[in-house]
Amino acid sequence: MDLDWTIIVRNWPVLLSGFVNTLKLAVLAIGASFVLGVVAGALRLSRSPYLHYPAVLYIEIIRGVPLIMVIFWFYFLAPILAGRPLDNFTSALIAFIVFEAAYLAEIVRAGIQSVPLGQVQAAISTGLTHRQAMGHVILPQAIRNMIPALVTRFIVLFMDTSLAYIIGYRELTRVARIIAEREFRAFEVYTFIAIVYFVCTYAMSLVAQRLERRLGPA
Amino acid sequence: MLLAGFLGLQYDFRWSVLWESPFGYWLLQGVKNTIILSLLAWVIALVLGIALGILRTAPWRVPRAVATAYVEFFRNTPLLVQLFFWYFAVPQILPAGPIRDAVNSLNVDTPLLTLNYEFLAALAGLGVYTSARVGETIRAGIQSIPRQQTEAALSSGLSLVQVYRHVLIPVGLRIVIPPMATEFLSIFKNSSLAVTIGFAEITFQTQQVNSYTFKGLEAVTAATLIYLAISLTIAAFMSRMERQYAIPGLIARGATRE
Amino acid sequence: MKKSLGVLLALLFVTTAVAPALAETVLEKINRTGTLTAGTRTASIPFAFINEKNEWIGFSIDFLEAVQARLEKKLGKPIKLDKKEVTPATRIPLVANRTIDVECGSTTYTRGRDETVDFSINFFFTGSQLLVKKGSGVKSLADVAGKRVGAAQGTTNEKAVRAQQPRADLVTFQDHAAGFLALEQGKIVAYVTDGILLAGLAAKTKNPKDYEVVGDLFTKDPYSCIVPENDSKWRDFVNHTLMELIDNGKYFEMYDMWFGEKGVVQYPMSAQVRNFMIMQSMPE
């Protein structure tokens, strides 16, 4: 078994750039999809059929297809809908945001629904409007409940950035593949990036645990 | 059909490519391969996952640590990287010789599908990845069974093995039906990643149809509808199972899908 | 269940019906954005590839830079060349939907493809061959019946293998580098693509002597750049750039740099091809 780990060192700059691209995509996607997810989750809970049904349609369709499909859809369709060409980073970003938001919407919905009904009633009976009740009583508790599921989902999103490679975005996995294929050394490179991903996701889950402990049980 | 919409693209929809031979046949092949891969991978994931769930709740430290390491590692690395690892990296470290050659050039035609390394690597990758997640789910299920049940069973003379066999596993499995349904659905969706190592599942075939006909959007639409049909079927099937087998009062948290 | 699917289809068609039309031509778009978005490859040696120094270079990339220079002269402002990686499977859709303005790599001009996109005049000629490990015993397409053969998905080579040797077990890869790795690992007995690309793949590896390109050319592969459909001004521009390069000899210099004695792959230009290229250049 002759392994050559020096290729990692030799290709360090390009590996680093791949990692930076991964972070770029992940951070932006996490932020934007969270916002969209909250909106979609709230719409799904809405009692107005004009808000509720489109939200349900969006969530159920996206959750029923693989991420690869959504990426392909946006890759080919988005430039047409936007009326102008989009680069692969933007297409990938939009695809990720749309995809992850559907899952986050469900987490948000479950989180809001996990707040006992008595709280809502109590809040309204003390004179708060529905919106104030949502903002001051329900959402804070809901968010605390959601944190484990949210972080799990964010971790999945971080790992899913590896799929952006399909449309040529030079994130870590794509860079690894280019190196592996040029140097014929797949084992070293893929082991290395597996460790990188693992360290990052592990760090994310540690942060989440600390966050959960700080905010206290709901 | 409404073709006029694609003004800037001059895109002529030609839905007939979907059933013209050989394109329709290719898509069907893709569906067949997806289903076979997903089902077999699910079997592997289930078997390994139950074993992991047991190991992680058992009272012995070393197996528990090993199982935990396994779960943490395979859950927290991307499936894509794992697939590449199985397909490209594993053959590299096999000792040079007949085994490695056999693995690499495997090509057996069976009535169901062609057995080649693309399939085996996809199966291994998908199975191992999902087994880590299933193992985690089953562990949560077993641990949510009230302690008293285990203690009662043990004190009534059952050995630990028997407690697992007759109490913890059956009850645990029934508790976690909802998250397991999600995992089962995930396997189908994740099978689409096997396109990157050359396995001819649905996504692969849509690209194939696209490269021959350039009617990519029709093919992608068809593939999307197929995936939707599969997910909705599984969802319906699983909610029927949940209704039949659920134990009232012990539904796992997150009974809403994921 | 069925209702959701029905609504989905309805939504799809509504969206397509209201999609805004892309009325801008490519030259207008380049003028407006100051960027030439070009698709090219990362493993088509020596047309467009990434070398050990991680530089993205190649014969086709040199041509793209010539187009960029001529654009700067014509539009009177600096133009940025934005290179985007494409694969055989994505290059045509991306040009067709105008995500990229032009693709110059190693794309074969075929009539079938011409229905979805347009092509420039030719800048290279080759054909399909097989790359095998020395001593494999494979000398032509006939020898791979019943054996595993690799090709890139979406290429003319893949279709040719299917058509001319249906008894081969075809394994498809996303790009040439993946196929070459599979050949190196013994997953396939032969990798099929254009002869010049095979020579390039072998030349850049650590042990070029271990590989050989075999077989007669079993397809005709003239290379052109891809441009969006129905944009004559842009196609003319790309064509005239190439014609200028032929007239002032730069084309032959570029060719010599990549395919000559000091080139990456030795592939001397035949007299027939030289004449053809000169004849392709129309008078002003």
Image (cartoon, grey):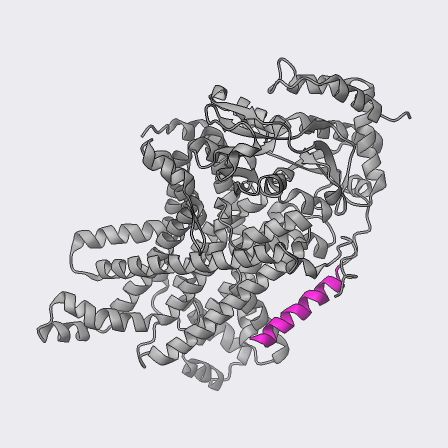
Place of residue C189 in the rendered image (x, y in percent of width and height, measured from the top left)? 48, 33
Do we see residue A34 in this rendering? no
Q: Is C268 in the magenta?
A: no
**Considering the image in quadrants, where does the C terminus of chain B appear?**
bottom left
Do we see residue A155 in this rendering? yes
Main secondary structure of the magenta stretch: helix
A208 or B182: nearer the viewer:
B182
A6 or C182: nearer the viewer:
C182
Q: Give the residue displayed 74% in from the left and 66% down from the top.
A: B1
> Magenta segment range?
C1-19
Residue that sits furthest to the bottom in the current view = A125
Residue C161 drawn above or below residue B38: above
Q: Give the residue displayed 49% in from the left and 71% down from the top.
A: B233
Place of residue B21 in the rendered image (x, y in percent of width and height, measured from the top left)? 64, 56
Place of residue A149 in the rendered image (x, y in percent of width and height, measured from the top left)? 41, 63
Place of residue A197 in the rendered image (x, y in percent of width and height, measured from the top left)? 41, 45
Q: Is C6 in the magenta?
A: yes
Residue that sits furthest to the top in the current view = C261
- Does residue A187 appear to the left or right of C227 in the view shown? left
